[in-house]
Image (cartoon, rainbow, N blue to C red):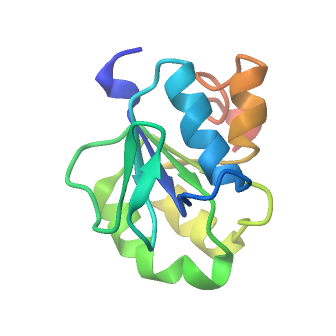
Amino acid sequence: MSASWTTLVIGASPHPHRYSYLAVQQLQKHGYPVIALGIHEGMIDQVPIVTSWPSTPVHTVSLYLHPRHQHQYENKLIAMHPVRVIFNPGTENAPLEQHLREAGIAVIEACTLVLLSTHQFETAGLNQEFN
């Protein structure tokens, strides 16, 4: 994969039982560059968990953050303008999803882990059937 497929995981956790942890691992395993953003610094294998918003352009954002905590990232997400934002199960947020769509960002409600394991990560949400 090229750097153009860089994925930002928001809600990254250093705890191995968390889905965000597994997502970072699987993104790396599948060859995608990944940035892990969390509220606490730490590591997921060789990936540092950062606590500051990254300046690196990203292709995809994968959300692992409860909707009540997403508002603080809305303007940053729109300004970053990733190609796509994946709302993993439990993170669905209709108002934010609508704002992202209005900004021209593809939105998908799906599980990053499933998309990776079924080889749909590079296509999901990038065509009308998922939006």
Q: Nearer the viewer, residue 10 or 124?
A: 10
Side of 7 where 29 appears, left or right: right
Task: Answer with left or right where residue 113 lies relative to residue 11.
Answer: right
Write down the quadrant of residue 17 in the picture. Answer: bottom right
> Could you say which is closer to the camera, residue 10 or residue 123?
10
Q: Residue at x 68, y 39 (%)?
A: 112
Where on the picture, by quarter, is residue 128? top right
Residue 110: x %, y % from top left: 76, 45
At 69% across and 71% down in the image, what residue appears?
Answer: 93
Against 52, is 83 above or below? above
Quadrant placement of the N terminus: top left
Residue 84 in picture, x, y percent from top left: 51, 43
For the C terminus, which image quadrant? top right
Residue 108: x and y in percent read 68, 46
- 17 w.r.t. 114: above or below: below
Q: Residue at x 43, y 71 (%)?
A: 40
Q: Is residue 103 left or right of residue 55?
A: right
**Whether residue 87 can be seen here:** no
Q: Is residue 17 visible?
A: yes
Task: Give coordinates of residue 105: x percent, y percent.
Answer: 48, 49
Residue visible at 62% across and 64% down? 97
Give the tally of numbered discs. 0
